[in-house]
Amino acid sequence: MSLGNALRAERIKFTTLPSQWAAPLTAVVITVGVTTAVNAAYSTKDHAPGDDPAAGIFYGLLFGHVAVACLGILLMGQEFNTRMIGTSLTAVPRRGRLYAAKIALGAGLGLLVGLASTAGCFLAVDATAGLDLSTPGLARSFLAGVLYHPMMVLICLGLTAMLGNFSAALGLLTPMVFLGTTWLAAIPGVREVGQFLPDRAGLYAMRTHTEPGIHYGHWTGLLIMALWTTAAAYGGLRAMRRYQASGE
């Protein structure tokens, strides 16, 4: 099976499984919905949710990125959960090709979700609290917001492949994305290390203001998350190849 056919097969799986296509829709609805509600509420009090404009723009992402993480877990872990991974490996004996198809689909879906969520948040803030498009760093913030989504999908997809277990990935990664890294970043001393975690670095890349105690710049934050994405994707590929070698 060619890469194009493998990608087509992954697309069919995605569109026919409600649990998968519901995840990106949920991510957009939660992210834009929460951002709209919060900024509408704050606009009546004549002040923003934070000193940094990006704090208000991406407020909903603090909740919506859990659904983004679930999308990456589902794209890889659904077949482990239903034990259909063996069928997929029979249909596409080249493990790297099967994995590449999943990576391509995940990146594409993540990019679409990122565009929809980020554009929706910007429009929502402009319509409720007002948005100054001349704010320095706002264009970079928009770009970081878009790219955050596909990178989060691929990180979770790769880690799920490494774990080889849907339940373990869902039980470990979603709490970590929702509360874990935020909790770590709040602990004195641990915060110095926690700021280099992928979601922390990606979220900081969206900021327009600098933050004391962060040891890198906004663009570097985006690079840190990209490095985590590359490492997770490569780790997932190695795991898929080991899966072939073990004959499972």
Image (cartoon, rainbow, N blue to C red):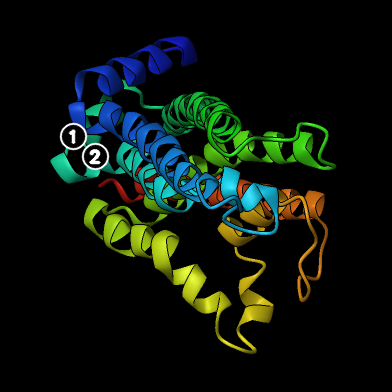
Q: Secondary structure at mark 2?
A: helix
In the foreground, 186 or 13 = 186
Q: Nearer the viewer, residue 27 or 35?
A: 35
> Residues under labels 2 and 1: Cα distance?
8 Å
Residue 185 locus on image (x, y percent): 57, 75
The kind of secondary structure element at disc 1 is loop
Amino acid type, label 2: Gln
Residue 84, labelled with which disc? Answer: 1
Tell me, yes or no, if residue 101 can be seen here.
yes
State left or right for residue 71 relative to residue 155. left
Labelled disc at residue 78: 2
Q: Position of residue 99 (x, y in %)?
A: 44, 33
Q: Looking at the picture, does residue 234 appear above or below residue 212?
A: above
Q: How many marks?
A: 2
Q: Earlier in the sequence, mark 2 or mark 1?
A: 2
Q: Quadrant of residue 13?
A: top left
Of all residues shown, which one is farthest toward the bottom? 189
Q: Which residue shows up at 47% across the image and 53% down it?
A: 62
Badge 2 crowding class, 10 Å Cα cut-off, few under 14, some 14 to 19, many 20 or more, is some
Residue at the image position 23 percent from the left and 37 percent from the top: 79
Left or right of 176? Residue 165 is left
The residue lying furthest to the front in this view is 45
Residue 59 image point, x, y percent: 51, 50
Q: Residue at (51%, 28%) from the top-left corner?
A: 120
At horizontal 31% and vertical 52% (from top left) the residue drawn is 164
- Residue 237 appears in the picture as rendered: no
Q: Label 1 amino acid? A: Met
**Does 104 appear above or below 209?**
above
The image quadrant where one finds the N terminus is top left
Q: Are marks 2 and 1 in contact (CB under 8 Å)?
A: yes
Q: Residues within 10 Å of mark 1 (few under 14, many from 20)?
A: few
